Amino acid sequence: MSDVRDVGERPRSDAWDTRPEEWDLGAESAYASAEETAEARTGAVAADRVPQAVAAEAAPHAAGAVRAVDAGSADPARKSPARRGAADPVKALMHRHRELCERAVDPLEIAAGLEAHGLTDRAAARYRHRDVFSLAEEMYARVPRDDDRPPPRPAPTGGPREHRAWAVLALLPGALCAAAVIGLRATGGRAHLAVAVLGALAVTLGLRVALGRGPLRAPAHTTSAATRVWTCWLLAYALLGDGLLRAALHGGPDGPWPLATAPVVALALACGPAAWCARLFAVHARRRLAASRGLEEFRGSVTPLFLGVFALFLAALAALLALTGALLGRPAVSVGAAALGALLLLARLLAVHGAGRAPTVVLGTAAAAEATALATVFAARLPGCSALVTPVETLTDAWGADAVPVLVCALAALTLLIHAIRTLTRASAHARPPGSP
């Protein structure tokens, strides 16, 4: 029986094969032939130990099986073709996702990558696993390494000093915006214009710095120049748009129109709560990803987390709107500014987690809708075009001048919210720390 054990030992080979989806086919076929030969010989030996009548009846079949196996091994041309990928489907899957397996620092990244490529828990059963997470654990364990040890995890970058840094930087846009508003109220004439220009530049730079560090930092490939342009337009409309629209509907503007400073200051101050909410969501989502044993389980646990974080930000933004409105003489909370804040948070969260295309489209659509509303009011002054102002005039007569940003930003935010629930609750959105390239 020693020869059976020697023949039956499965040959070892390199984990990565240069042939696509063919993993050690010669070794697999040799191993299968050895197993068949061993079984045939074992059956022939066992035939001697049974009663003579049974042995006489079984001997021809066992002998025929041995001759067939020996003939097949002696004649290479008669060997059956090797099965492609049937012996080790996990190894074939590793070859298709070789780059993912090699750069992953833990099984969670592999699981998230597989989900991003459309592999579900049901599809994982084809690879003899109950879910994607267990499949990813086997793939991670089978990645060949020089020293047979897992790669070291990247050094944590979230030390106390860095946490304090981004927490302070998140408050910078609000502080600069408040200072600019104070300067506008304290000056007049040419100095007033100079303070307005310098304040706008300072707030823009402050936003750039705040969004470049911490939980709100997005990969470069998810934030395009178009996204920045649409965001600046929406913020500019929040400051200038309602007053300009109101003046245009009454035949103006005949001079400077009032600025909506309170909502803009509240939106700038909301960068702080936005950063903390983004960090809260990212940290808890990663923890639940590590504790989950299935994609549906993870999605079910992260969805209420995301909705809770979003509601927390809306509550903080509403409080800031009420506070700035009371301090700057506008006690009513601006619903349009609240809708804009929700829209900007959702767009940034999607960009941070690698889904920047949808925010660009939605922000551009919202900006175009607001620009169209203003353009139709001025275009209605042309001969024969008076009907163009009817939709905007009807809307503002019923709900006020801020009805345009309320309607536009609310619909845009609702669209992004639906998209974010589907996108940010997937494991692939949390494969790496937010903002990583």
Image (cartoon, rainbow, N blue to C red):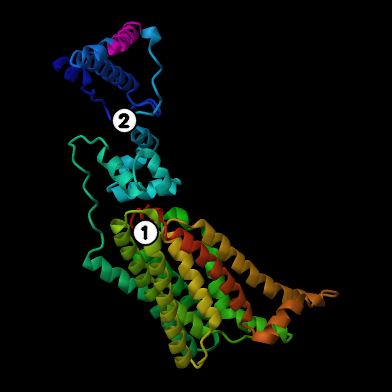
The answer to whether residue 360 shows anywhere in this view is yes
Q: Is residue 172 at all visible to an observer of this figure?
A: no
Q: Nearer the viewer, mark 1 or mark 2?
A: 1
Residue topped by disc 1:
298
Q: Which residues are magenta?
A: 57-75
Secondary structure state at the residue bearing disc 2: loop
| Residue 123 numbered tag | none
Query: How would you classify the magenta stretch by its main secondary structure?
Result: helix
- Badge 1 or badge 2: first in the primary sequence: 2
Report the side of 169 relative to 415 (left or right).
Answer: left
Question: Is 12 drawn above or below residue 143 in the view shown?
Answer: above
Residue in front for this viewpoint, 4 or 176: 4
* Circle 2 residue: 16
Rendered position, 258 above or below 383: below
Count of numbered tags: 2
Q: Are marks 1 and 2 in contact (CB under 8 Å)?
A: no
**Is residue 282 a member of the stretch shown in magenta?**
no
Q: Badge 2 local density, few (<14 within 10 Å), some, or many (20+)? A: some
On the image, the x and y values in percent for residue 394 come to 73, 82
- Residue 5, position in %: x, y? 17, 20
Real-space CA distance between mark 1 and mark 2, rounded to the nearest whole angstrom: 31 Å
Across and down, in percent, residue 155 comes to 22, 54
Residue at the extreme right of the image, as rendered: 384
What residue do we see at 36% from left, 67% from top?
Answer: 281
- Which amino acid, mark 1? Phe
Which amino acid type corresponds to the residue marked 2 in the rendered image? Trp
Q: Is residue 287 left or right of residue 149?
A: right
Quadrant placement of the N terminus: top left
